[in-house]
């Protein structure tokens, strides 16, 4: 069976990072010019790089998509994603909306999921509680969240993150249902018609 590209977006503080880490699929590690947070590791959370390195990768066509988010560059290395899809795996990209829409354009069969917490208030609390951004950056990320929510209609599914196991389970159900769509089952349809 062909692999599947699952793109997960959602405002900073929606809990999408925790959800993504709990999923049992191949997870793409992005490249970014943002500085690492205290608990982040190079090659696991991100490939941290300079602006020059990022631009070189972008200009060499090594990125599947890229975007600027609150003044920093982020991009998805192309090779890992293409290899995993070729091997028939489900690959998850946890990326912001502009990058997600770029990928959907190139791969219309990609599945787009948007994750939000139950209320905007929850978002503000989570951002303040995790204590990884200064107040100005929290403000910028809140504004960005309100802009991103305007694009929710471009997505295939909305997950309201009430609790972690429910959200993870909903994503597993979506992946299973997507595999039952006829356009993903061409080989099974052929088997049905050929074997009499
Ligand atoms: P953070 O700085 O909180 O780790 O990420 C900021 C935003 O950038 C999040 O919305 C995250 O999903 C997004 N992001 C992370 N990696 C990528 C990427 O490779 N491409 C794009 N377009 N967005 C990314």
Image: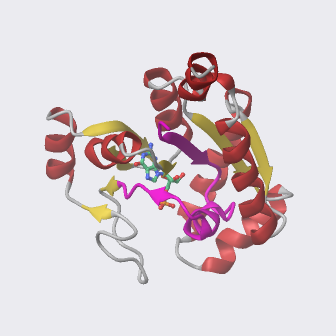
Q: Which residue does the image show at 36% across and 71% down from the upper left? A: 44
Task: Please tell me whether residue 116 is drawn above or below residue 47 in the rendered image.
Answer: above
**Looking at the figure, which quarter contains the C terminus?**
top right
Q: Residue furthest top?
A: 193
Residue 94: in sight, yes or no? no
Residue nearer the viewer, 56 or 141 = 56
Colour scheme employed for the rendering of this structure:
secondary structure
Left or right: 84, with 160 as reference point: left
| Residue 175, x across and y down, in percent | 66, 46
- Viewer-nearest residue: 103 or 181: 181
Identify the residue at the far front of this view: 196
Residue at 40% over, 42% down = 85
In the image, is residue 42 above or below residue 64? below
Instruction: Name the foreground residue: 88 vs 195.
Output: 195
> In the rendered structure, does residue 7 fall within the stretch colored magenta?
yes
Q: Position of residue 190 (x, y in %)?
A: 56, 20
The mark total stands at 0
Residue at the spot x=26%, y=44% of the render? 79
Where does the magenta region start and end?
A: 1-30
Image coordinates for residue 71, horizontal then vertical, percent? 40, 49
Could you tell whether 164 is left or right of 34 in the image? right
| Residue 154 in picture, x, y percent from top left | 67, 27
Q: At 62% from the left edge and 78% from the top edge, which residue is drawn?
A: 130
> Does the rendering let one see residue 98?
yes
Does the magenta segment cover residue 20?
A: yes
Residue 43, picture quadrant: bottom left
């Amino acid at each position: 069976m062909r692999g599947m590209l699952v793109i997960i977006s959602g405002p900073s503080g929606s809990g999408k990072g925790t959800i993504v880490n709990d999923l049992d699929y191949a997870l793409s590690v992005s490249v970014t010019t943002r500085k690492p947070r205290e608990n982040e590791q190079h090659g696991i959370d991100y490939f941290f790089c300079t602006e020059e390195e990022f631009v070189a990768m972008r200009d060499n066509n090594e990125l599947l998509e890229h975007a600027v988010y609150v003044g920093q560059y982020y991009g998805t290395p192309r090779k890992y994603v293409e290899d995993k899809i070729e091997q028939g795996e489900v690959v998850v990209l946890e990326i912001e909306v502009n990058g997600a829409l770029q990928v959907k354009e190139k791969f219309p069969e990609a599945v787009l999921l948007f994750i939000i917490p139950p209320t905007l208030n929850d978002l503000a609390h989570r951002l303040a509680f995790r204590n990884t951004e200064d107040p100005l950056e929290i403000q910028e990320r809140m504004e960005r969240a309100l802009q991103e929510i305007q694009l929710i209609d471009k997505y295939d599914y909305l997950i309201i993150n009430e609790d972690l196991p429910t959200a993870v389970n909903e994503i597993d159900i979506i992946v299973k249902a997507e595999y039952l769509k006829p356009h993903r089952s061409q080989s099974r349809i052929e088997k049905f018609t050929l074997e009499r």
